[in-house]
Amino acid sequence: VQRKKVILPDSAHGTNPASAALCGYSVVQIQSDERGLIDPKKLETIMDEETAAVMLTNPNTLGIFETDILKICEIVHNKGGLVYCDGANLNAVMGKTKMNRMGVDVLHFNLHKTFSTPHGGGGPGAGPIGVIEKLARFLPKPIIEHAGGKYTLNHDRPDSIGKMKAFYGNFGILVRAYTYIRSLGPEGIKRVAEMAVLNANYIKASLAEHYHLPYNGPSLHECVFNDKHQLRNKVSTMDIAKMLIDYGFHPPTVYFPLIVKGALMIEPTETESKETLDEFIKAMKQIAELAETKPEVFHDSPQMPVVSRPDETTAARNPKLRWKPTN
């Protein structure tokens, strides 16, 4: 059977359907349920023998753990498909569990977030991929092997997909991530996950009375609010984000994931101190109060930067990467 499709939840990051399409697959979207999760019953109706894989993130882009992950993987495997996990949110669970125990077949690691490396580091990026044992023979060659105190390159891989151009990516980024992992050690890695989850839930609990939570289930490393309360006074998510700049904070991700209207995604990560979190929470509460009492001030924010509100849509769609004289 020729497998032509890849299934993704509607909460997925845009790079997931883009990657599947780039490989020639047609993308099938599955709608999240009222919990913000993949519904196994819905998945069962669209999973067939033409489907190569389900791509998901666990915890997902809402910061919620896919509680039905075992059932999801069972459904996919029963039809001969594979489960591919985007490791974007691995910092919520690393050291606590293993993806293969959930039934995941392929996992890529986002070194730029979970393992402290710069995003791309000047390029190219680096996204190591791990696979279960039965897929190992398909990995790109050569494979590095260690025997007799020596490291060798093994090109004798008849089932390999072949050698890929620069498939190791940015070697310097890999070294930095490896150093970070070794420095932390097993207990340190667990501590990272614990602090990432604790920090996100501290913010969530502190701001729940001030900002709307469209999905109010248990959160892990991030929480997603929206502007439902503030829109009553014509203050939008973008206004909130711009006002944060005047309070000295870089705005969080806005309008993503796409399944949340007016999304305000807050992911403090494990590195922020309680003092910084408290300052951020205080700023967010003051902004919520301003939205009630003086909503008109938002439309002039931010006032601190030299450039206040550039046309971001045009900049993204028609970038001008160098200055040109007008005359």
Image: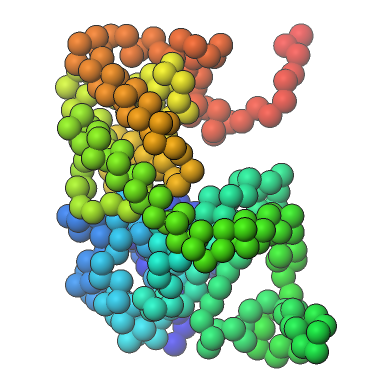
Q: In the picture, residue 45 is in which quadrant?
A: bottom left
- Relative to residue 296, is residue 253 depicted above or below? below
- At a point 62% along the width and 58% down the height, the residue shown is 183
- At a point 39% along the width and 86% down the height, the residue shown is 80
* 295 lies left or right of 185: left
Q: In the picture, residue 322 is in which quadrant?
A: top right
Can residue 22 be seen? no
- At a point 33% along the width and 86% down the height, the residue shown is 78
**The C terminus is located in which quarter?**
top right
Q: In the picture, residue 55 is in which quadrant?
A: bottom left
Q: Nearer the viewer, residue 320 or 196?
A: 196
Q: Nearer the viewer, residue 113 or 26?
A: 113
* 115 lies left or right of 204: right
- Relative to residue 137, is residue 17 depicted above or below? above
Q: Residue at the far front: name it.
A: 187
- Measuring from the top left, give residue 131's x and y in whole percent: 54, 77
* 137 lies left or right of 211: right
- Measuring from the top left, give residue 240's x and y in whole percent: 34, 24
- Measuring from the top left, give residue 111's x and y in whole percent: 58, 56
Q: Nearer the viewer, residue 84 or 184?
A: 184
Q: Nearer the viewer, residue 232 or 193?
A: 193
Can residue 211 be seen? yes
- At a point 82% along the width and 83% down the height, the residue shown is 150
